[in-house]
Image (tube, grey):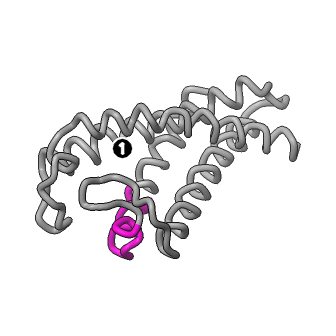
Amino acid sequence: MLKNILEIGALGCVLFTGLIFFMAYSGIASAMRDEHGNFRKEKNFKSVLGAIVFLCFLLGLLFYANVKYTNSLSTTPSLIHLWINSFGVFFIIHLYDLLVLDYLIIIKWHPKFLALPNTSYYRSFRPHVIGFLKGIPLGVIASLISSLLLLWIK
């Protein structure tokens, strides 16, 4: 299971980085967040599209992780094993987002080509840690959904 978590987690980090760049350069990210990094209350087509694309990416990757894990076994694993596998993948990507993308790139490097504003969200680590903690329940639920979906299909 650990090998699968690390393999799919690494693949997910690369794909997630690509998704972030796509969302940034298509204008979806700026439609979803304000200059302080908060999610906008008013919704528009791009912000809804961004949420749908992100959720499809997340659920699809976690489902794929469970399929790959299941195919490596002779029997169908239990719900808890599938959940641990998919949550492990989620956690690796979530931790990568916090440490590499948020801390190293956005806060420490703060490259000019990203055109990031000089607000506290883009210059301090605290809001990113709070976002990381708020994201954990999303991972718990997404991992459960992807695990239940696999068991339902099998």
Image quarter (top left, top right, bottom left or bottom right) of the C terminus: top right
Report the side of 45 relative to 108 (left or right).
right
The answer to which image quadrant residue 72 occupies is top right
Q: Is 21 covered by the magenta stretch?
A: yes
**Residue 70 versus residue 118 in the image, above or below:** above
| Residue annotated with mark 1 | 97
Nearest to the observer: residue 73 or residue 59: 59
**Residue 41 versus residue 98 in the image, above or below:** below
Q: Can the viewer see residue 18 in this picture? A: no
Residue 57 coordinates in the image, percent (x, y):
57, 57
Q: Residue at x 53, y 60 (%)?
A: 51
Residue 9 coordinates in the image, percent (x, y):
49, 40
Residue 6 coordinates in the image, percent (x, y):
49, 34
Q: Residue at x 40, y 60 (%)?
A: 40
Nearest to the observer: residue 148 or residue 117: 117
Q: Main secondary structure of the magenta part?
A: helix
Nearest to the observer: residue 97 or residue 69: 97
The answer to which image quadrant residue 146 occupies is top right
Q: Residue at x 45, y 66 (%)?
A: 42
Q: Can the viewer see residue 96 in this picture? A: yes
SS for dot 1: helix
Q: Is 26 covered by the magenta stretch?
A: yes
Residue 49 coordinates in the image, percent (x, y):
54, 70
The answer to which image quadrant residue 29 occupies is bottom left
Q: Amino acid type of disc 1?
A: Asp
Q: Specify start and end residues of the magenta stretch as a single range.
A: 17-31
Report the side of 43 relative to 120 (left or right).
right
Image quarter (top left, top right, bottom left or bottom right) of the N terminus: top right
